[in-house]
Amino acid sequence: MLLAWMLSLGCVTKIVDRVTVDRIVGQAKVVGDTQMPCALGESLNHVLMATQGKKTPDLALLISNGTSAMCSQSTAWEEHLRVERTKVQRPLEDPFRIAEIKDAQITAARWDTMTARRFYQAFQHAENAFGTVDTPCPKIAKEDEVAYLVALISGTFAVLHDKQSDGVNGVPLDLLPKIARGATCLDNDTWWGVPDALQAGIWATIPGSGPSDAQPWDLLEASASEGAKSGVRVAYAVGALLANNAGDTDRMKTFLQGYGESLASTPRHPDWAFFDQYAYEVALHASDLYWIGEVGYRTPELGTFPIKPSESLETNTDDDPFGETDPFSEE
């Protein structure tokens, strides 16, 4: 009986892959909530690993690792915001200011380490399932294209989060040029301009990785603008993310403003609500970092910016929601 069970594992792993990609992803992608899939990814990962025998359910583990990384990523983001918030809100003479900043930086690095590891594991499972993510393109069944897209996004985040945690996981830096080439294996129009956006963004941030005559930022902006018409704004999030990572604040603001304008004009695509929501959260984090750095609080509305960014936390009664009285005063 044990032998029969072991022999059947090859069939079981294939079923697990198909149920995960076809049914679980199929249901999750229409829900605009990223925390439920991330929690599901965390809880299912070891269960999925337990089904492996001679074969591994790599597509399923790609999804579970990629979505579980979003849980640790959101915590890492909060700690990065705490760093910036402390810099702005704590006065220089505060004896605990430096300690608070240092504590937030260390905590953020720990969560970045976990996030990079999970995203990189997702990417590795993708390469086990598809073959090398690069050109020439691997064979990708139509129903598995969404998993391949998750792999491209996971690989990109793996590199960025590993960089923020001082390379603890050893994610190879040449992963990004591979992703730029591998992105051409998906149809750009079908996937909301994301393949071109990833490729262009990587070209823009890694000198010499693209054609000498390429205008990568222009290509990325065009892809984001066109892709947003579908109601899935992942390309705008890619632009804001990579521009922020490159330290190009003006370009980041351009992508964030475009994102905000799209929100006002184009409803979310109901079939891909999860991806649009995740894109929103990626863009919102970039915006929050900017807002907190300038005025000490988070983005009130995505696509807007502080009117006077040169003014830090100066008292302005016009912005005081309570006027001259403090409803929380003990008096």
Image: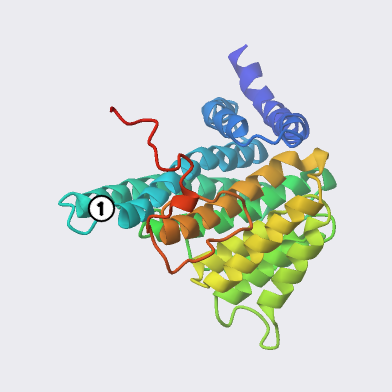
Q: Residue at x 60, y 54 (%)?
A: 283
Residue 265, given in percent of the width and then of the height, sits at 81, 53
Q: Is residue 240 above or below residue 204?
A: above
Residue 252, given in percent of the width and then of the height, sits at 58, 67
Q: Residue furthest bottom?
A: 213
Look at the image and tell me in which quarter the C terminus lies: top left
Can residue 249 be seen in the rendering of this structure?
Answer: yes
> Which quadrant of the figure has residue 184?
bottom right
Q: Residue furthest top?
A: 1
Residue 263, given in percent of the width and then of the height, sits at 74, 51
* Residue topped by disc 1: 102
Label 1: element kind: helix
Judge by depth and name the residue closer to the eye, 324 or 5: 324
Judge by depth and name the residue closer to the eye, 2 or 269: 269
Q: Residue at x 57, y 34 (%)?
A: 38
> Which quadrant of the figure has residue 61?
top right
Q: Is residue 82 above or below residue 47?
A: below
In this rendering, position of residue 104 left or right of residue 3: left
Judge by depth and name the residue closer to the eye, 136 or 194: 194
Residue 199, given in percent of the width and then of the height, sits at 67, 68
Residue type pointed to by label 1: Lys
In this rendering, position of residue 134 left or right of residue 184: left
